[in-house]
Image (cartoon, grey):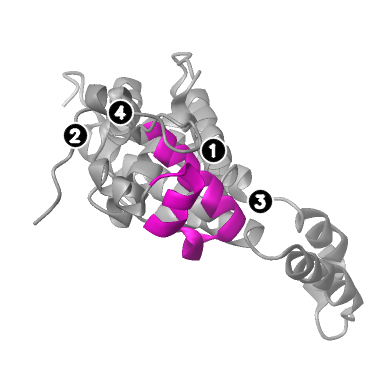
Amino acid sequence: MAKQMVSDSPRRRRRPTKQGVVLSEQTIIETALRLLRHHGSAGLSARRLGAALGADPSTLYRYFHGIDDLTLAIADELIGRSFHGWEPTGDWWRDLYALGIRSHAAYLDHPQAAVLSASRVSGRASEQSAVDTILGILREAGFPDGAAVRLYRAFVDQMLAFAALDGAELALPDDVRASDRELWRSSYTQLPAETHPHIAATAGLLVGLADRSAYPDALELFLDGARALLQRLEMTRDPAGT
């Protein structure tokens, strides 16, 4: 049987831990993010959380049903951080581009958490607000509902896929990541035009792009494709707008 959850106000009234920390859902989430940064997903456990908070490990279950429930809360926290401070401009292309870049950056601020949570559905408040906001941008831009839903899904999944990919790279040990990037220089720049003509012709450009994510380029291409779709839809609509 799942342990009984406590409401937020009683949590705040609880006595501080041995380290003087007054526990709350948010405190546990932030501590979990720190543990993930330093220890990876293997370091996220009730025992480690309890030690970091100066509390009994069982305390976690007063706030979350378990580590998986905490993982969903972390996913929702990253989504919320993506939208913090964002203001719509009314230009759907620019608004979605800004949200994509902000979301990708929020995940990469916590690469281990990105790898752990990018494939999850939190079902929580920040995620629900994000889904409604993005669908609203697309519908108000003029996309019919079917297209808006498909584009929403593609937009979010593209960002999450890059967040997981780029997060996994950032989570590698520094020497391994540096070695992988050096291979672009030591291997691809040495290939002869006789056997690999296209690589030889573009090797400098390939190496130049090795140190940055391809996500901004992919996002721009996606949004340009969405804009072309909207233009085609507008051309085929009858005067009644059906």
Mark 2 or 4, closer to the camera: 4
Give the foreground label among 2 and 3: 2
Would you say the residues marked 1 and 2 are in contact, meaning their CB atoms lie under 8 Å apart? no
Q: Name the residue under label 4.
A: 14
What amino acid does circle 4 point to?
Arg
Q: What element carries label 2?
A: loop
Q: Residue at x 40, y 50 (%)?
A: 157
In this rendering, is residue 152 above or below 89? below
Give the residue pinned by disc 3.
Answer: 213
Say whether disc 4 or disc 3 marks the residue closer to the N-terminus: 4
Examine the structure image and report whether residue 27 is included in the region drawn in magenta.
yes
Q: Mark 2 points at which residue?
A: 6
Q: Could you tell me how far apart the alpha carbons at marks 3 and 1 are, in whole angstroms?
A: 14 Å
**Magenta region:** 26-55
**Mark 2 or 4, nearer chain start:** 2
- Answer left or right for 62 relative to 44: left
> In the image, which is nearer the foreground, mark 1 or mark 2?
2
- For the question of whether residue 142 can be seen, the reply is no
Give SS at disc 1: helix
**The N terminus lies in which quarter of the figure?**
bottom left
User: Distance of mark 1 from mark 2, alpha carbons?
Assistant: 29 Å
Choose mark 4 or mark 3, whichever is in front.
Answer: 4
Residue plotted at (24% across, 21% down): 9
Q: Number of marks in the image? A: 4
Q: Residues within 10 Å of mark 2 (few under 14, many from 20)?
A: few
Give whichever of discs 1 and 4 has the lower sequence position. 4
